[in-house]
Image (spheres, rainbow, N blue to C red):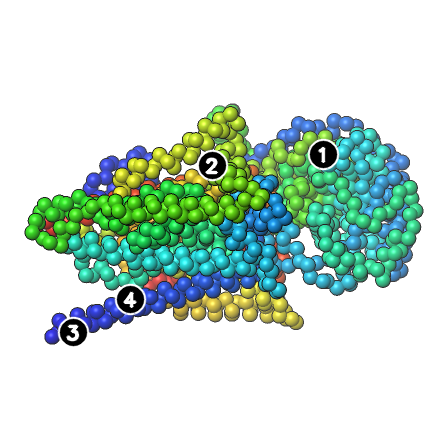
């Protein structure tokens, strides 16, 4: 677009240029009507966002090889009674005893080795999540910290591996059940039952083409940490003995010998790390107690770090089998508060009406959607966008995505807490059959999941919006940015009327590019943004202080840095014509690049960010100018500018959103810090976006507003 | 009296300005070196030396270390398609790659060499810029076009070019990321410096070394010959001729522009001397475990046949990964002759501005190179600074600036998306490479056209002066 704009200048000044080409003329028309175009595009972009639930397509199994539900289940009651015996043995152990955890692991290992599978223990130390600003651009292993942790926080996972009888062991499917060996929990025991039932069946079947790994993850330090450390050790072999010894030395004196001392079952329990092939898919299985449900439900969690999703086919298979074979109700997370918003219902009614009218005009047009469906879809879509935008994985499956393994968490919650053994067995049977079916489907795969989508938003378990659809809305929203930047640039760099006379024009003198000083200003503010986003790393090192203190230190240091920068770079030159236009033009270009980049990294963040930044950038105009004109239009603009620049300030926006959702009663300054800390601890790109795109842009918009022209 | 006073003041302030400009340059240059050193000592995981943008098969220091290791263990350094650089570079940098200093990052000595190379390049660029500016002023003066108000300004174009070179993020990344391109760039700039100052042996040495290291600078022989033959950049010769026709009696402008064959012959003699010298050194270096023939095969042959198809910021790797094998030779010829086809027309059109011609050649070859890295744009963007006075009216500069920034941040992200996350594919990354190539094309086209416009403007200006 900027290219076009330059052409216009060229066409205006030198007389020997021929008439521009049609595409150039089109660009000139667009640029000269940039106000109209930007209003139309922005409105269309926002409308397109609200149309997304209507444009959602039904999911379908894209990969033919999966063939879900084509084989009948082989799971028998024998497997389940064995599994229930294991669960009873685990829960009957006295949880108060110090070595109950060791005892439980031993029981589990004994059962596994009785099945004739390979069993191993995996020891790990739980690491605190750490801030690696460069983590995103490097391989997953380079951010690995090698410092010596204390021996206090270690855990032991139990791993069972079934070798596929007719395969070469190059591929594997992973089942994960988080289990806290130190505590007695009926729901976790239930999940172990389900896992064991499936595993014991799989150890007997002849159709396995991929190895099966069952990871019983020690969840006493969080479910994610144990899975992540197992995956790291799985994929990144340690060649130097030093770091593995580090973990081992903690166990030497303790109780690892207890684990090693006997081999109770049919197979040896190995102390070394056991591996199978590359992972085709992973399922994390959890059972939770949720009160007041009408039927057994299955919640699917799929968001991994930075809004990455597993291949849609995996969710499709689970959804298909759960709904059509096992009769479970499948849920994905949604914002319940959206359901209470009056205006969403009204919007739904309107869209429903439009759809009906369109349908009556031409029966071929079937884009109507019923109002409840629309509202449900919006609530799910909002939650899907929010979870992806946060960039924090919603469960242990997130660890797999870092190694390009498709994984989801299945959270099954029974209708009631079963006391009757028969009902309980039936619940286990249904859940285990679901897992068996999914494993059997994935087992059929010849290659990695690649057929279906990786980039999508869910509006219900069986409906999705693909990247090709949601990108249109985003593109419409950001399209005005380059246009407005170009038109501002042209306005600011118009040749002065005095230079029109030939004598002036024909002079050899170097006039510095006007935009360079604006670019310098934008660059300084962005450098300040980098400084601000690196500060928490140092602030968090301060011992014994509260989040509130942290945020106050952070805020004051950032403001101080901005003041210093302002004083250093403040040029004494008088304000010249077109200065703020240049500044705005460069700012808008920077925002455009930033949003484009973010839409590739994490679409949801870019979409939400664009909703705030695009109006803020486009409307920004020096307040002085508006005050001078003092018309109704300029007054309106002042009001919107002040409002937007207040909302766009990240802490203010955070507290407003929080207040709307949870009431303005109990606000704590530290909450914002805690929230951001969670972002950077998970290496979320959203944190970098806020620090390096959003905040600098906000500062620049303020500078434009307060510009003395 | 009053006028004299003001004149004096003017000259004083000018001196101060010049002094201030020099001080500014030194300060910024020292800052650039310090910045590089801090980045080298930075204990973080910058991991630049394994980025595809920085280290190509030709410039990677890890490959060089591997080649040196092979040589030390009595094997041909070119065994196993690891190393494809010059044996001389191996002898100079190889020992530095194995030397470790306690408590310092590995490859610290190599890094220091590259920082030094960058600094020398910047100093040479500055000197070249001075020379070019003097020539420009002189030709303007002889056309009576120089007006006094124009020479006020903070830094001269040479200073700006040197600072652009030193502070260009591409240069910094190439230097800190331990690619050998700073050394290659140094020899390119040395060639131009030698030519601009008229030192034929130096120009010949720079050209021979640059060609030996990366082959593509071979086409620079044409600009070098033109510089030595005609002198540095000047307005078109017919301008002077028309002026002469207009005012016959003027002594100053009666300088005839003659192609000085003597200096060109001098250059050619020196070129052959240096080539023989480099070849002898190479053969001594490789004679134990391999031969000169193998050296040519593994360096020039590797460049010309595009054997390594690992992704880089160029456009060839994807194409040759996709193309059918039996068309491969044909397209190899097509792509390489692309560069050759452009040599002659450009040389004819821009023969009065040979240094600018060299810039255009370097930009074109870095676009169509088989293994481009960020060191190449670093070189031509630095050279672009030399022609700031002439290119002041260049169009699209803001657009190009935004484009370069956008592509250079988007490209690593696309690479990450493809290689590490698996949600993107090669097309995503290649799209940024194509966008980058487009921006380079726009840059070349626009700079050439604005240079020609500048010449036209000078023509009009002198015509209008003549009419008066």
Q: Residues within 10 Å of mark 2 (few under 14, many from 20)?
A: some
Indicate the secondary structure of the residue bearing disc 4.
helix
Q: Quadrant of residue A124?
A: bottom right
Q: Nearer the viewer, residue A217 or A191?
A: A217
Q: Quadrant of residue A18?
A: top left
Q: Specify the subunit that label 1 lies on.
A: A
Instruction: Answer with mark 2 or mark 3, whichever residue precedes in sequence.
Output: 3
- Which sits in the foreground, B151 or B88? B88
Q: For residue B18, which numbered disc appears in the image?
A: 4
The quarter of the image holding the N terminus of chain B is bottom left
Does residue A216 appear in the picture of this structure? Answer: no
Disc 4 with disc 3 on a shared chain:
yes
Image mark 2: chain = B
Task: Give the percent coordinates (x, y) of residue A113.
Answer: 88, 43
Which element is circle 2 on? helix
Looking at the image, is mark 4 or mark 2 earlier in the sequence? 4
Q: Which residue is mark 3?
A: B5
Q: Give the foreground label among 2 and 3.
A: 2
Q: Nearer the viewer, mark 4 or mark 2?
A: 2
Whole-number angstrom distance, CA of label 1 to CA of label 3 = 91 Å
User: What is the chain identity of the residue bearing mark 3?
Assistant: B
Q: Residue at x 29, y 53 (%)?
A: B198
Q: Which residue corresponds to mark 1?
A: A442
What residue lies at 81% left-to-right and 38% top-to-bottom? A162
Q: Residues within 10 Å of mark 1 (few under 14, many from 20)?
A: many
Is A608 placed left or right of A261 in the picture? left
Please determine whether, in this image, residue A100 is positioned above or below residue B227: below
Does the residue at mark 4 contact the one at mark 2 (Cβ under 8 Å)? no
Q: Answer with mark 4 or mark 3, whichever residue precedes in sequence.
A: 3
Determine the CA span between mark 1 and mark 2.
46 Å
């Amino acid at each position: 677009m900027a290219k076009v704009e330059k052409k216009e200048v060229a066409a205006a000044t030198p007389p020997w240029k021929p008439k521009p080409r049609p595409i150039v003329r089109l660009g000139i028309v667009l640029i000269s009507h940039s106000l109209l175009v930007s209003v139309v595009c922005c409105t269309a972009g926002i409308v397109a966002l609200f149309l997304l639930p209507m444009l959602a397509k039904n999911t379908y199994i894209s990969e033919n090889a999966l063939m879900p539900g084509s084989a009948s289940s082989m799971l028998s009651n024998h497997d389940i009674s064995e599994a229930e015996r294991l669960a009873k043995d685990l829960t009957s152990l006295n949880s108060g005893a110090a070595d109950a955890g060791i005892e439980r692991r031993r029981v589990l290992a004994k059962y596994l080795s009785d099945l004739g599978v390979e069993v191993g223990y995996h020891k790990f130390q739980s690491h605190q999540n750490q801030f690696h600003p460069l983590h995103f651009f490097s391989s997953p292993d380079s951010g690995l910290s090698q410092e010596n942790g204390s021996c206090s926080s270690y855990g032991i996972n139990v791993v069972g591996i079934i070798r596929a009888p007719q395969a070469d062991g190059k591929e594997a499917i992973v089942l994960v059940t988080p289990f806290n060996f130190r505590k007695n929990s009926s729901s976790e025991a239930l999940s172990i039952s389900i896992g064991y039932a499936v595993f014991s069946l799989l150890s007997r079947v002849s159709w396995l083409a991929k190895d099966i790994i069952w990871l019983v993850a020690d969840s006493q330090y969080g479910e994610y940490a144990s899975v992540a450390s197992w995956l790291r050790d799985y994929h990144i072999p340690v060649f130097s003995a030093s770091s593995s010894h580090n973990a081992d030395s903690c166990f030497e004196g303790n109780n690892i010998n207890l684990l090693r001392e006997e081999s109770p079952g049919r197979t040896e329990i190995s102390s070394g790390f056991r591996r199978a092939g590359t992972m085709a898919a992973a399922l994390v299985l959890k059972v939770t107690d949720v009160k007041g449900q009408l039927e057994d439900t299955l919640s699917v969690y799929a968001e991994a770090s930075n809004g990455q999703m597993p291949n849609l086919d995996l969710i499709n298979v689970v959804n298909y089998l759960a709904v059509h074979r096992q009769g479970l109700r499948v849920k994905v997370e949604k914002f319940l508060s959206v359901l209470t918003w009056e205006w969403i219902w009204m919007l739904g009614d309107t869209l429903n009406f439009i759809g009906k009218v369109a349908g009556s005009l031409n029966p071929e047009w079937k884009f109507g959607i019923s109002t409840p469906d629309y509202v449900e879809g919006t609530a799910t879509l909002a939650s899907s966008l929010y979870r992806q935008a946060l960039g924090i994985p919603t469960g242990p499956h997130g660890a797999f995505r870092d190694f390009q393994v498709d994984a989801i968490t299945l959270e099954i919650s029974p209708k009631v807490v079963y006391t009757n053994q028969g009902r309980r067995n039936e619940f286990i049977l249904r859940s285990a059959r679901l897992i068996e079916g999914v494993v059997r489907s994935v087992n059929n795969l010849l290659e990695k999941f690649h057929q279906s989508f990786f980039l999508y938003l869910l509006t219900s378990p069986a409906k999705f919006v693909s990247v090709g659809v949601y990108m249109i809305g985003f593109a419409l929203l950001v399209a005005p940015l380059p246009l407005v930047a170009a038109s501002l640039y042209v306005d600011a760099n118009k040749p002065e009327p005095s230079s029109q006379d030939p004598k002036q024009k024909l002079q050899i003198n170097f006039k510095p590019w006007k935009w360079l000083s604006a670019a310098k200003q934008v660059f300084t503010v962005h450098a300040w943004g980098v400084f601000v986003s690196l500060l928490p790393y140092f602030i968090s090192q301060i011992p014994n202080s509260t989040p509130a203190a942290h945020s106050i230190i952070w805020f004051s240091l950032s403001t101080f840095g901005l003041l210093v920068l302002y004083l250093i770079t403040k040029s004494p030159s008088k304000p010249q014509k077109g200065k703020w236009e240049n500044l705005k033009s460069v700012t808008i270009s920077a925002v455009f690049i930033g949003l484009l980049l973010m839409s590739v990294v994490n679409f949801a963040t870019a979409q939400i960010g664009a909703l705030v930044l695009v109006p803020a950038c486009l409307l920004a105009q020096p307040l002085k100018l508006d005050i001078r004109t003092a018309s109704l239009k300029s007054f309106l603009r002042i009001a919107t500018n002040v409002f937007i620049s207040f909302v766009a300030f990240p802490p203010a926006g955070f507290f407003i959103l929080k207040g709307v959702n949870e009431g303005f009663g109990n606000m704590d300054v530290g909450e914002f810090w805690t929230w951001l800390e969670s972002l950077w601890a998970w290496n979320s790109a959203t944190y970098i976006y806020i620090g390096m795109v959003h905040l600098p842009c906000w500062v620049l918009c303020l500078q434009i507003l307060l510009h003395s022209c | 009296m009053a006028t004299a006073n003001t004149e004096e003041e003017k000259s004083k302030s000018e001196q101060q300005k010049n002094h201030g400009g020099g001080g500014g340059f030194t300060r910024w240059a020292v800052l650039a070196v310090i910045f590089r050193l801090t980045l080298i000592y930075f204990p973080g995981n910058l991991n630049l030396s394994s980025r595809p943008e920085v280290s190509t098969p030709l410039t990677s220091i890890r490959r060089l270390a591997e080649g040196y290791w092979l040589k030390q263990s009595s094997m041909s350094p070119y065994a196993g398609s690891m190393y494809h650089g010059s044996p001389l570079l191996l002898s100079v940098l190889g020992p530095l790659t194995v030397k470790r200093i306690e408590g310092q990052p590995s490859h610290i000595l190599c890094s220091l060499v590259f920082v030094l190379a960058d600094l020398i390049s910047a100093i040479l660029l500055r000197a070249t810029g001075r020379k070019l500016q003097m020539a420009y002023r002189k030709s303007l003066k002889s056309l009576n076009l120089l007006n006094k108000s124009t020479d006020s300004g903070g830094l001269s174009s040479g200073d700006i070019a040197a600072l652009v070179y030193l502070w260009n993020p591409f240069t910094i990344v190439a230097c800190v990321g331990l690619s050998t391109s700073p050394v290659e760039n140094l020899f390119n700039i040395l060639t131009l410096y030698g030519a601009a100052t008229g030192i034929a042996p130096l120009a010949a040495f720079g050209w021979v070394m640059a060609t030996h290291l990366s082959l593509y600078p071979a086409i620079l022989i044409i600009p070098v010959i033109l510089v030595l033959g005609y002198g540095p950049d000047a307005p078109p010769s017919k301008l002077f001729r028309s002026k002469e026709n207009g005012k016959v009696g003027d002594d100053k402008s009666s300088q005839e522009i003659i192609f000085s064959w003597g200096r060109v012959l001098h250059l050619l003699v020196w070129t052959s001397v240096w080539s023989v010298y480099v070849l002898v050194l190479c053969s001594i270096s490789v004679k134990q475990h391999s031969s000169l023939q193998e050296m040519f095969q593994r360096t020039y042959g590797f460049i010309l046949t595009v054997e390594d198809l690992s992704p880089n910021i160029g456009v060839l790797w994807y194409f040759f990964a996709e193309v059918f094998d039996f068309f491969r030779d044909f397209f190899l010829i097509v792509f390489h002759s692309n560069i050759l086809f452009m040599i002659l027309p450009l040389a004819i059109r821009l023969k009065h501005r040979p240094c600018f011609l060299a810039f255009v050649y370097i930009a074109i070859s870095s676009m169509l190179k088989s293994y481009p890295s960020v060191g190449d744009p670093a070189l031509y963007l630095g050279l672009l600074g030399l022609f700031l006075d002439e290119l002041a009216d260049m169009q699209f500069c803001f657009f190009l600036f935004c484009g370069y920034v956008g592509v250079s941040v988007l490209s690593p992200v696309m690479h990450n998306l493809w290689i590490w996350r698996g949600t993107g594919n090669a097309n995503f990354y290649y799209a940024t490479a194509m966008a980058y190539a487009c921006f380079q094309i726009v840059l070349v086209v626009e700079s050439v056209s604005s240079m020609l416009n500048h010449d036209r403007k000078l023509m009009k200006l002198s015509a209008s002066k003549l009419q008066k």
